[in-house]
Amino acid sequence: MYKAIFAFNHKKLKLSYSPILGSLEPSNLCNLNCVMCARDTISGRGSGLMSVETLRNVINVENRNVIRTVDFTGHGEPLLNPKLEKFIKIAKPFARKVGLTTNSTLLSKDRAKSLLDAGLDFVSFSFEGVSKEVYESIRVGANYETVFQNIHDFVALNKKLNSGCKTFLIIVDSPLTHSSLPKFVDYWAGIVDEVRIMGIHDWGGVLDSSLVEKSYSHRKLPCFEPWYHIYVRWNGDVVPCCVWEGKTKFGNVNEEPMPKIWNNSIYQKFRASLLSSPTDHCRSCNLDMLGDVFSEAVTVPHASFPFHKSTVSLAKRFITYRSRL
């Protein structure tokens, strides 16, 4: 991460390192209709399941260590892809960590075991389960009791098998959940490895919802994502991030090697635009990724990324600088 922060600080457009985090979209299909999700609103994405061939074009022998951490996530539910366990096995030799983010509705005991047997390193459960009423009003189509039990069963099996899979529980802070967060965190902190509270993302201004706090973390610094993170859609398209609505894509892994895409002219021009004149879509985005990553480097004991002490020191300086803007 230090190299990414250094490159961003010095406005480097061609990067000498591989992506630190890769979000690979196993599925663009979803079995829920969550109120804070704009997946059906964002245009130009299509829908389908990632193929083994597309994954192999991202991760292969020639691209060894091309992505340090692989997170199978995206605009759909990863467990809807029946080949997900195979994906994990393919990715394991070529990435330091392999994990996924799930709504946990399909995380049966059998599925949990097959994922752990495949070598899963971490899993993030998305769960606004402060109560049955609140949860089912947010995650429309989900059943509170089923998901609650699925998460408990996964954690228990992980411990029984001594699999070493890190477990994270993510809850979105909203007017519906805010007052119950202390009790919720106290309960789950004794079960999973880490509880993460996230603000509601407005998907680059696309989501028009009363749940979105319009004052929430509007961007003060250029987006940091293209300096450390790569997002590959189910069909192989490489795009700026998970909320990108525009027509810009950096390439397709089925047509061009991923390491070449990471530093091609389109990617470099996009990085330059973020430093000078970002698109309206990026400018209206309320996710301050730079601040989030730096704050995590300073405050979270077991952060998503293996931060070096020098990175934490640099992050503290950036947070101080950011507070003056």
Image (cartoon, rainbow, N blue to C red):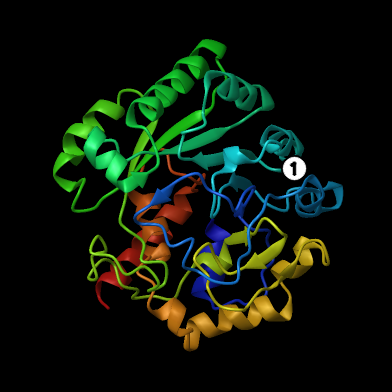
Of residues 186 and 85, which is closer to you in this image? Answer: 85
Quadrant holding the C terminus: bottom left
Residue at 62% from the left image edge and 61% from the top image edge: 230
> Would residue 3 be found to the left or right of residue 169 on screen?
right
Q: Name the quadrant containing residue 150.
A: top left
Question: Looking at the image, is 303 positioned above or below residue 14?
Answer: above
Disc 1 marks which amino acid? Phe
Question: Looking at the image, is 12 positioned above or below residue 86?
Answer: below
Q: Position of residue 81 (x, y in %)?
A: 65, 40
Q: Residue furthest front?
A: 141
Q: Residue furthest left?
A: 179
Q: Residue furthest bottom?
A: 277
Q: For mark 1, what is the residue?
A: 94
Of residues 264 and 150, which is closer to you in this image? Answer: 150
Residue at 57% from the left image edge and 70% from the top image edge: 7
* Neighbour tally class for label 1: few under 14, some 14-19, many 20 plus, Cα within 10 Å: many
Q: Position of residue 187 (x, y in %)?
A: 25, 26
> Would residue 228 be found to the left or right of residue 325 on screen?
right
Q: Position of residue 158 (x, y in %)?
A: 51, 19
> Would residue 106 be found to the left or right of residue 142 on screen?
right
Q: Position of residue 273 (x, y in %)?
A: 54, 85
Residue at 20% from the left image edge and 40% from the top image edge: 181
Residue at 71% from the left image edge and 59% from the top image edge: 235
Quadrant holding the N terminus: bottom right
